[in-house]
Amino acid sequence: EALARIAENADQYDDDRLLQRALDEPSSRAFIAAYPKSDKSSRPYDGDIRVGEVPKLYNWDEHWGAVTYGDGPLAVTGSGPTTLAMAYMGLTGKADFSPTEIAQQASKSNYADGDSGSKGELFSKLGNTMGLTINEYEPLADSLLTSLGDTTVIAAEIKSDSLTDDAHWVLVVNVNTDMSVTVFDPTSTAVSSRPWPEDTIANASTKFFALSPAQTATSSKDKTTI
């Protein structure tokens, strides 16, 4: 039914990426079907948030998906803000920085750019103003295994034609008992639904940013940063 509504109103979409997203991602279809008549505004995030539990968020969430970011709506351009929001909420237990607020700050600072939709400064600079400590690493498997922990997650910039067709940002949440890693991909429920070998994620990445709460960040003496 949602796809039928989208097809019927195809001429009302000013961004063809929304139509492609609807084809690729079933969970986005209700949002995209309603998009032409939405007021393109956002509302505060009202999901449950607890320190130590990273929420699994997606770009097309009705709370923020219609907000403009970069050259389109967050639903198709917002992997950076959504990734940073997931990290922030899980590490701090607070929701004052949702993808909407992060996107607004990033736009003011000209971080909404690049193949993946957001520059690395979104994490290295804006993240620091949000009460997080950020360390940048070489995108290597060892960086994932040694950096991830109870109070550290990793934002990874993913190359195009690797996990999905498009370059984007994801959040690597933890290391599993079999040494695979859990990835929350704000652009793909399929990527987010399975564990991934750490070397697959490393080989697909161009940047790693480790994010921790400022007061519990691991000492740089224990890490090799770049």
Image (cartoon, helix red, strand yellow):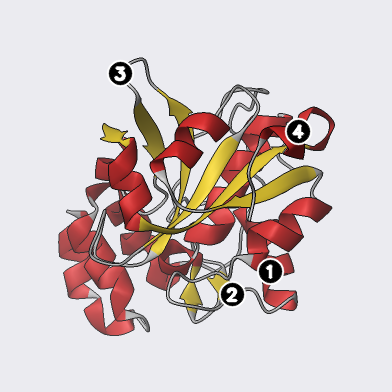
Query: Is 218 above or below relative to 172?
Result: above
Label 1 and label 2: CA atoms lie apart by 6 Å
Query: Is 90 above or below relative to 176?
Result: below
The label on residue 217 is 4
Lower sequence index among marks 4 and 1? 1
Q: Is residue 19 visible?
A: yes
Contact between labelled residues 1 and 3, with CB atoms less than 8 Å apart: no
Contact between labelled residues 2 and 4, with CB atoms less than 8 Å apart: no
Lower sequence index among marks 4 and 2? 2
Label 3 and label 1: CA atoms lie apart by 37 Å
Relative placement, left or right, of 175 versus 54 is: left
Label 4 and label 1: CA atoms lie apart by 23 Å
- At 30% across and 67% down in the image, what residue appears? 160
The label on residue 178 is 3
Q: Quadrant of residue 223?
A: top right
Lower sequence index among marks 1 and 2? 1
Give the amino acid at mark 2.
Ala
Task: Please state which of the two labelled residues, at mark 2 or mark 3, is closer to the viewer.
Answer: 3
Task: Please state which of the two labelled residues, at mark 3 or mark 1, is closer to the viewer.
Answer: 3
Give the amino acid at mark 3.
Asp
For the image, the number of numbered tags is 4
Q: Secondary structure at mark 1?
A: helix
The label on residue 112 is 2
Give the amino acid at mark 4.
Ala
Contact between labelled residues 2 and 1, with CB atoms less than 8 Å apart: yes
